[in-house]
Image (cartoon, coloured by chain):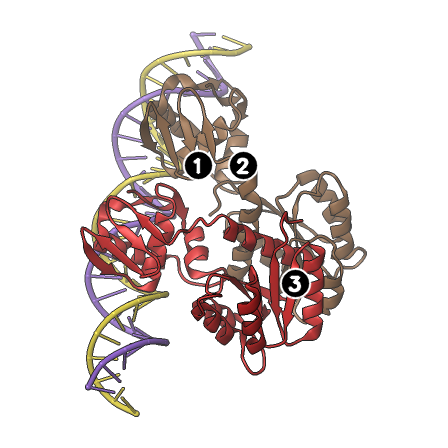
Chain colours: A red, B brown, C purple, D yellow
DNA sequence: GAAATTGTGAAGCCTTTGTGAACCAAAGGT
DNA sequence: ACCTTTGGTTCACAAAGGCTTCACAATTTC
């Protein structure tokens, strides 16, 4: 039971789902609002500023992915946590979901216990903002909003994946990130990609920002040294 | 490859499923035990205390849901992770309606890589709060996140096996670890390796961190002294 | 003192990682 | 629409270095 009750907006066209999920979240001590489609969801989100928005992917009129994009563009809601609800087996939607800026996805059907756990984990992540938008080191500074790295006064623009990998490593300098953790954090939960891909991205970071900052712990992973 | 190998109990009445899932989990570095029905599963679970129990939902005699309930009631196993295996298309509402206390659901058939990912994600979720990430002694401190040992202010980076061996010994200072135990904890249960390998790694630890901290009990094993 | 166990040094294997390049897909410009 | 550019992924090969083994010396046990 959370100390302060948080508001969750459930957006799904199926009233049964809304009720089922809403009921379980209520049971867990959250405040719940619902919306039956993307458009209404966005309107309510802007007005209520919920802590978390659960978005069904497949909806008539405006699907969850489009709604998510718009929520991310709107200044009021761009900071909200957004999680997708998608039917199991729709792997493609998972990938598209992360591209559009969601924080998590949850496959339906989901057991109440699992749902609550996921939601609480998300809330926790939001509460300790382990990711400030700017990081500064002797070697360089990172600005997440601008997607830019500044080194010796020179601005370096990094592609998405490289930037996210860099940001992840720099979020805890010295800590070793295993390949698994990197994969789930940068690429997403179930995205299947050969882990050698990480090596290639590390190499690019090394060539652009200096080899000395990225140490490899053989058999374990990589870490960033300031 | 997990740092220290975890035990997973696969409970399914179909031997093919047991073998398939078991094989993939083994490949991923887990220790695998199997049971052919709920009753046997519960018995084995209480004895083995696996880190994760994969429960088929549909089983003769005792189905997964009933087994899960009993596992949750038993003091020894109520802390275990439990995930259901259910065939795609099975009437889910029955399962979802039950809040039988499972931690996740996995639909069969499942791609090996997805299975591994799900399992590892589950492990991570449970593993983090359990084991402390840092150990501190007069002689040195161990930081699991950084895979580093700090001695007199000097940071020493250790290779994977050496680090895990060190961490194991230091997890209970003064306690003697037999070779068997070291082998299963650090190398895993199915790895075939001459036990002289342990000696070599002990020697490296001694040379790097000081001979005096690692005592050998002849005919038994090794222990760490602070 | 003989047998078993452990310490030690070195050598080879083999896994892991670095690297360059090719391929594919997506985005943007013309 | 077409072409160009760029990012992302994969692959093949090379390099590196950790892991393991082995032989032999040292130590302990009986």
Q: Position of residue B206 (x, y in %)?
A: 37, 23
Q: Residue furthest front?
A: A47
Compared to residue A36, the image places residue A129 above or below, namely above
Tell which of B194 and A163 is nearer to you: A163
Q: Is residue B226 left or right of residue A121?
A: left
Residue labelled with disc 3: A32
Q: Position of residue A224 (x, y in %)?
A: 32, 45
Q: Position of residue A168 (x, y in %)?
A: 38, 52
Chain identifier of the residue bearing label 2 in the image: B
Q: How many marks?
A: 3
Looking at the rendering, in which quadrant would you find the C terminus of chain A? top left
Chain identifier of the residue bearing label 3 in the image: A
Residues at discs 2 and 1 in contact (Cβ within 8 Å): yes
Q: CA distance from mark 1 to mark 3?
A: 40 Å
Q: Position of residue A119 (x, y in %)?
A: 59, 56
Q: Quadrant of residue A159?
A: bottom left
- Residue at image coords 63%, 64%: B107
Residue labelled with disc 2: B131
Q: Is residue B195 visible?
A: no
């Amino acid at each position: 039971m959370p100390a302060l009750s948080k508001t969750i907006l459930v957006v799904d066209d199926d009233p049964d789902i809304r009720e089922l999920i809403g009921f379980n979240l209520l049971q867990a001590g959250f405040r719940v609002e619902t919306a039956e489609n993307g458009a209404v969801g966005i309107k309510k989100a802007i007005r209520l500023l919920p802590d978390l928005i659960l978005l069904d992917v497949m909806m008539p009129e405006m699907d969850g992915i489009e709604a998510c994009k718009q929520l991310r563009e709107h200044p009021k809601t761009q900071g909200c946590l957004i999680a997708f609800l998608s039917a199991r087996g729709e792997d493609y939607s998972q990938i598209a979901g992360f591209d559009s800026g969601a924080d998590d996805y949850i496959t339906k059907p989901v057991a109440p216990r699992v749902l609550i756990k996921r939601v609480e984990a998300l809330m926790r992540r939001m509460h300790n903002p382990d990711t400030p938008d700017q990081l500064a080191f002797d070697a360089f500074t990172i600005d997440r909003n601008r997607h830019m790295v500044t080194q010796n006064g020179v601005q370096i623009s990094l592609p998405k994946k490289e930037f996210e990998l860099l940001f992840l490593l720099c979020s805890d300098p010295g800590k070793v990130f295993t390949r698994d953790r990197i994969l789930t954090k940068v690429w997403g939960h179930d995205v299947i990609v050969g882990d050698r891909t990480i090596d290639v991205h590390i190499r690019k970071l090394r060539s652009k920002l200096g080899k000395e900052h990225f140490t490899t712990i053989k058999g374990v992973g990589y870490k960033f040294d300031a």
